[in-house]
Image: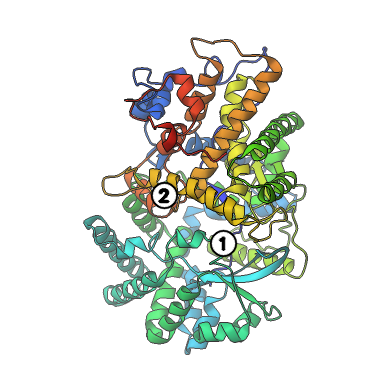
Amino acid sequence: MAIKRVAGLLLLGMSGLALAQTSAPKPKYGPWGVDYSSMDKATKPGDDFFRYAEGSWLKTAPIAPDKARAGYNYDMPDESEAEVRKLVEEAGPAPADPKMRRITDFYGAWMDQAGIEARGTAPLKPWLGRIAAIKTTNQLVALMAEPGFASPINIGVSPNSKDPTHYTVDTGQARLGLPTRDYYLLPDAKYVAYRKAYRDYIIHIQELAGIPDAAAKADAIIALETKLAQDQWTPEARRDPVKTYNPMDRAALTKLAPQFDWTPVLARIGLGKMPIVVVAEPSAVTAAGKAIAATPLATWKDWMTFRFISDHAQYLPKAFDDTRFGFYSRTMQDVQAQAERWKRGVRLLNDYLGEAVGQLYAQHHWTADTDKQMTELIGDLRAAYKEKIDNAAWMDEPTRKEALAKLASFDPRIGHPAKYIDYSSMTVSRTDPLGNAIAAEDFQWKLELSRLPKPVDRGLWDMNVQEVNAYYNPLMNQVTFPAAILQPPFFDPAADPAVNYGETGATIGHEMGHGFDDEGRQFDAQGKLRDWWTKESADRYTAHAQKLVAQFNGYEPIPGVHIKGELTLGENLGDLGGLEAAYAAYRRYVSRHGEPPVIDGYTGDQRFFIAYAQSWQGKAREGALRAQLLSNPHSPEEYRVNGIVRNMDAWYAAFGVKPGDKLYLAPEDRVHVW
């Protein structure tokens, strides 16, 4: 059973961040904060605003061979990773500081390719031996519950949605070998080819490990996963926080899926004293239990063996590592080449020792001045949201009162945590990268267990300081901006204020807006899962939201593959509501400082929207884009621009967009969150 179920809403691919103004320094990008060379001014803004803002870049910028995507959001991590590498390698192989030694030993074990090759498959033997020793279904389920081993269900610890001051145990469906259930079930030739390639991959991984009858075992494994996929919930259904909150005692759990032997299994992994478990997808858990009983024990053992090798292939000799890359990256996402070894090592450090690395990063790459400027901009957005809520026509007074209370309790975190995770109990070897990975998973599980009896710590972060991203957590009503995203092009104190508000403001507004989107609005000011909306306000809001669903359902980034409007609704609402709030905040700024001058022929409002569009610079390989459309709640960048601005009245006025322009929507067809 996988051990971590992440709480909160993570945003993948953030817009740019910038703030403040000064006449002395020059912006990193262009004369006022955006890159002229990226634009395609031959494209009419009202026909394709995304290409108007960055069409030249789209035509000429390559996607690196080791990446599935290109753009600010995907290239900026290169700088963060290089900075982390420098910090680690400058420490030397044996630093005196035990915190640093843990980092360098983990990294050094990964970088020792000669040692990995020399050890061959020997590091696998104790782990695969535990699978081979299974004699009963109860033993099978017990091993599935341990860190490092695959299971058809997850068990984790997270804040309780109905009482976010305390932790609860939760369980639900787990990931399978293919990215989503659609890859098992869709009949199109493309997915048939993916399934064939997956079968070949399973065979090859087993053959590398010296496992006999690889083809027959691969067929049984795929049949098992296909049956599990048929009963799993869709990504859209899993977004519903009410339907995925099903607290059950032991009797109810046993009735739901008796095959999992809940009482001894939970006791074995340290959860025996927890009387209630929250089940996210009950029907999928029931189906997984039935599969435990209906599938031969030998097939389950073959599945666990394959998954253990596959999930840890990168820690094994090059043949294993290359085979995994060949399927999951080259075949599934069209990535052409492996990232350099050091980059992958830094990413593993971020995964397993992320806060230890983040503490180092913050010491070198965070300033009090950045903190001050971000706090000022967040204040403007808070004021803009208050004005929006005060004047929202679809919101009645009881709902408005609750919304203002939620806005008042909103908790922004900037830069880095006040305190960091202590990794001193985690054992790291200089010569065993596979053992280090398992030790890290075991450490994380024990860390969660140690928190369980205590009140929820609101100071914990779900994202690393060195991560170029941001997120909103509805259970805490918190938005978090790590240090790594607060630098050019995402943060530039010298940029024009219009750019600052179009990029930074839209990002902050997006995250704050998650508190009022279709999912986040179901959590109150204290983060409790509670319906605080009157029926009248909810009905009016939903009517607006469904219009946005219909718009995005109509977009077809790949022939035959549309955006899923219901799946992406929360992020689309965040984009639209965030941009509306950011524009209002910008106009507040203008009211204090006066109407800005025209610069290089662009008005302040035009610069605001161009900056927003450039902040979503991005392109993707087809395989990666297909996977995103099937399961990711974020729309592709093009539609986070064109699909959003066409609903903004101010955009029409700024660029003179008229009927007949391709993006034009009649006023009555435009969706306004606020």
On the picture, is 395 further left or further right than 71?
right
- What amino acid is at disc 1? Pro
Disc marking residue 241: 1
Instruction: Determine the secondary structure under disc 1.
Output: loop
The answer to whether 274 is drawn above or below residue 83 in the figure is below
Measuring from the top left, give residue 255's x and y in whole percent: 53, 86
Q: For the C terminus, which image quadrant? A: top right
Residue 637 located left or right of residue 660: right
Label 1 neighbour load within 10 Å: few <14, some 14-19, many 20+: some
- The residues tagged by marks 2 and 1 sit, at their Cα atoms, a distance apart of 18 Å
Of pointers 2 and 1, the one earlier in the residue sequence:
1
Is residue 589 rendered to the left or right of residue 134? right
Residue 543 spot, x, y in % from top left: 48, 49
Q: Residue at x 47, y 89 (%)?
A: 135
Total number of numbered labels?
Answer: 2
Q: Tell me which amino acid carries mark 2.
A: Gly
Q: Secondary structure at mark 2?
A: loop
